[in-house]
Image (cartoon, rainbow, N blue to C red):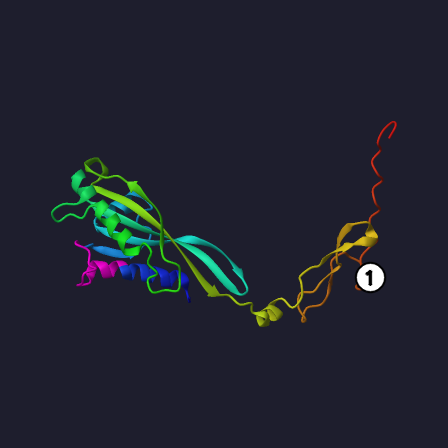
């Protein structure tokens, strides 16, 4: 998958818009005004109040990922949230909907049915619904709107090969070496030079004339006294 974040966000939004707009049996029994990517609409009370003017609305947000690579393949579990925003000053309508009003519960169920267990035509695992959580309970005292979030996870795999050609150009040799010195009774000591690149000179990091090599090893500390009878 190329650009997995952009690809998955685009596919989720497209699927929700299809159910909202398509003239088919898959269309929702109501219409949503806005379905788009999340752009910080709920980061403050002021922004939330402005977003409420666009309700009923759905906003899709990328929430991060975890993963790891093996054999030049990278596997990631990507988290997605879909925010459901409803508006009405009648508490019953705000929750369940009414004439000309899409309720919060209706939005939640529509998103659930549209996305759960769907691959959206992409090479990824089916979307798994991890949880649903109310974020703002509205009504007359809550500025007339309610907000909830559905969190989904999906796993995708894509190639992530090593680029040895660039490795050799950018870092032709280790910046510094640390080696175990058996002759020094287990003391870890750094090499006296740094090799930055072929065009840079070798730098002595421990002082002295060039090529003098490392200074003498520090003497070992005497063993601690065990006291009388030790």
The reply, left or right, for residue 171 in relation to residue 5 is right
Q: Main secondary structure of the magenta part?
A: loop
Q: Which quadrant: the N terminus?
A: bottom left
**The one of 65 and 174 positioned closer to us in this rendering:** 65
For the magenta stretch, what is the residue range? Answer: 16-30
**The one of 218 and 210 positioned closer to us in this rendering:** 218
Label 1 crowding class (10 Å Cα cut-off): few <14, some 14-19, many 20+?
A: few
| Residue reaching furthest to the right | 229
Q: Is residue 68 visible?
A: yes
Q: Which quadrant: the C terminus?
A: top right
Residue at position x 43%, y 60% from top? Answer: 156
Residue at position x 29%, y 45% from top? Answer: 148
Q: Is residue 227 above or below residue 183?
A: above
Residue at position x 29%, y 53% from top? Answer: 59
**The one of 176 and 110 positioned closer to us in this rendering:** 110
Indicate the position of residue 110 as horizontal and vertical percent values.
24, 52
Indicate the position of residue 113 as horizontal and vertical percent values.
27, 53
Q: Is residue 69 above or below residue 46?
A: below
Indicate the position of residue 94 as horizontal and vertical percent values.
19, 42
Q: Which residue is mark 1?
A: 212
Q: Is residue 229 above or below residue 193?
A: above
Indicate the position of residue 55 as horizontal and vertical percent values.
21, 50
The magenta stretch spans residue 173 = no
The reply, left or right, for residue 80 in relation to residue 111 is right
**The one of 57 and 72 positioned closer to us in this rendering:** 72
| Residue reaching furthest to the left | 99
Residue at position x 28%, y 62% from top? Answer: 14
């Amino acid at each position: 998958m190329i650009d997995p974040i952009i690809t998955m966000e685009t596919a989720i939004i497209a699927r929700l818009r299809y159910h909202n707009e398509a003239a088919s049996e898959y269309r929702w029994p109501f219409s949503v005004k806005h379905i788009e990517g999340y752009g910080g609409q709920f980061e403050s009370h002021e922004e939330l109040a402005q977003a409420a003017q666009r309700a009923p609305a759905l906003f899709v947000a990328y929430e991060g990922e975890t993963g790891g690579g093996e054999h030049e393949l990278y596997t990631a579990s990507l988290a997605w949230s879909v925010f459901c925003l409803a508006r009405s000053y009648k508490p019953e309508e705000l929750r369940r909907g009414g004439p000309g009003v899409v309720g919060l519960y209706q939005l939640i169920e529509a998103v659930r049915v549209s996305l759960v267990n769907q691959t959206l035509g992409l090479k990824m695992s089916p979307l798994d619904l991890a949880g649903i959580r109310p974020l703002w309970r509205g009504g007359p005292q809550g500025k007339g709107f309610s907000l909830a979030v559905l969190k989904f996870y999906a796993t995708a795999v894509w190639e992530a090969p090593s680029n040895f050609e660039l490795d050799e150009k950018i870092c032709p040799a280790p910046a510094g070496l640390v080696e175990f010195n058996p002759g020094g009774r287990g003391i870890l000591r750094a090499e006296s030079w740094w090799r930055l690149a072929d065009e840079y000179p070798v730098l002595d990091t421990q002082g002295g004339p060039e090529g003098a090599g490392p200074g003498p090893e520090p003497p070992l500390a005497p063993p601690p006294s065990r006291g009388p009878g030790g």
